[in-house]
Image: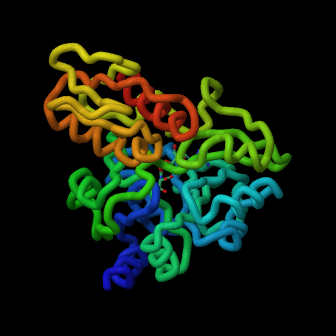
């Protein structure tokens, strides 16, 4: 069985790609700054980009952050699952400062994927993991995509099949006074969070709190054109709510946003691989998971 071996590699400061329900993660021992540095190197990621520390649950998270009652309520509702909480870091947290990019806060998530949980249990401590792709590329939703992108830079790839959700976790920051702000839309929709803690502010357009919110972050090679009803000749078309024409792809023929999220990155990769210079994307509704899908597409379309 490869889980014990993966845990051993983490203990030795190595890098392990593992599946989560959102996207594949590039994991390292959160307490080992050398291992964390290898993550940045493997990703080609600027060092100021802080990482999410993955834990088994709320009890473990409390060891690393000061969690306001609202953060606790959110964790109890959405964990284990595609939800990340940023809160004030405890001075005694084992997660090294490099992983937090020197910030006074820390990002924590308890994933639900059984293989991720087995790995966390076998390792016995927090595992930091960004999405398992080279910096600026689309996130990997299969073990093969992660391996293609990272190659010999990682020590082991755990294959747990295609990710069920296919879109990164929702990130909120909960401050000591209980203010909740949405930093990154994701698999848990805003309405689900607001049902629990009331109206939440969005960090969009304001100061960049998550460096991952840099405009051009999730980018395929081809340029993207959004909200396109009918593609022009030579453009690869990414359809929604319709079947794909030859040379194109569809996020969901039936117009299902969950299916669209799960297909997003694989579809972008596939259309990129056709060699087209422009990917024209059909209009995507803005509600529910559509907000996160539109957010990723807008970043991918940003000038770079
Ligand atoms: O679904 C996910 O969240 C996946 C899986 C592997 O868990 N992980 C993921 O990690 O998407 P990554 O590194 O690609 O994105 C993490 C985001 C980055 O935008 C980072 O800037 C932000 O979280 N982040 C981490 N710590 C933060 C902090 N203390 N304050 C604000 N943003 C933070
Ligand atoms: Mg990422």
Q: Looking at the picture, tell me which residue is in the foreground, 75 or 131.
A: 75
In the depicted structure, whether residue 101 falls above or below residue 184: below
Give the x, y percent position of residue 14. Answer: 35, 70
Q: Residue at x 35, y 45 (%)?
A: 263
In the depicted structure, whether residue 156 falls above or below residue 222: below
In the depicted structure, whether residue 117 falls above or below residue 194: below
Using residue 157 as the reference point, say whether residue 165 is left or right of it.
right
Which quadrant of the structure image shows residue 12? Answer: bottom left
Q: Quadrant of the N terminus?
A: bottom left
Q: Residue at x 61, y 59 (%)?
A: 108
Using residue 136 as the reference point, say whether residue 295 is left or right of it.
right
- Is residue 130 visible in the rendered image? The answer is no
Which quadrant of the structure image shows residue 189? Answer: top right
Q: Looking at the picture, tell me which residue is in the foreground, 245 or 25.
A: 245
Which quadrant of the structure image shows residue 201? Answer: top right
Q: Residue at x 62, y 39 (%)?
A: 183
Q: Looking at the picture, tell me which residue is in the foreground, 141 or 244.
A: 244
Using residue 295 as the reference point, say whether residue 109 is left or right of it.
right
Q: Residue at x 34, y 43 (%)?
A: 265
In the depicted structure, whether residue 296 falls above or below residue 40: above
Q: Looking at the picture, tell me which residue is in the foreground, 151 or 24.
A: 24
- Is residue 89 visible in the rendered image? The answer is yes
């Amino acid at each position: 069985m490869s889980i014990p071996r993966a845990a051993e590699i983490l203990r030795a400061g190595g890098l392990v790609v593992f599946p989560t329900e959102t996207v594949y993660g590039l994991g390292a021992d959160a307490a080992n700054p050398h291992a964390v540095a290898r993550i940045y190197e493997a990703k080609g990621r600027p060092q100021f980009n802080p990482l999410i520390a993955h834990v088994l649950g709320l009890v473990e998270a409390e060891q690393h952050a000061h969690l306001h009652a609202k953060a606790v309520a959110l964790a109890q509702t959405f964990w284990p699952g595609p939800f990340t909480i940023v809160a004030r870091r405890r001075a005694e947290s084992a997660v090294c400062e490099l992983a937090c990019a020197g910030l006074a806060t820390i990002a924590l998530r308890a994933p639900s994927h059984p293989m991720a949980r087995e790995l966390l249990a076998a390792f016995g401590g927090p595992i930091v993991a960004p999405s398992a792709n080279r910096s600026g590329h689309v996130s990997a939703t299969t073990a093969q995509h992660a391996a293609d992108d990272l190659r010999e830079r990682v020590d082991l790839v755990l294959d747990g099949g295609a990710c069920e959700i296919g879109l990164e976790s929702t990130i909120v920051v909960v401050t000591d006074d209980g203010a909740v702000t949405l930093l990154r839309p994701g698999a848990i929709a805003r309405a689900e969070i607001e049902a629990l803690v009331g109206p939440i502010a969005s960090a969009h357009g304001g100061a960049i709190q998550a460096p991952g919110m840099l405009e051009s972050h999730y980018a395929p090679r081809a340029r993207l054109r959004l909200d396109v009803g009918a593609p022009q000749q030579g453009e690869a078309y990414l359809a929604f709510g319709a079947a794909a024409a030859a040379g194109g792809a569809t996020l969901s023929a039936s117009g299902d946003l969950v299916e669209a999220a799960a297909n997003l990155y694989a579809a972008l990769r596939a259309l990129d691989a056709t060699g087209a210079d422009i990917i024209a994307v059909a209009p995507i509704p803005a509600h529910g998971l559509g907000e996160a899908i539109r957010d990723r597409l807008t970043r991918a379309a940003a000038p770079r």
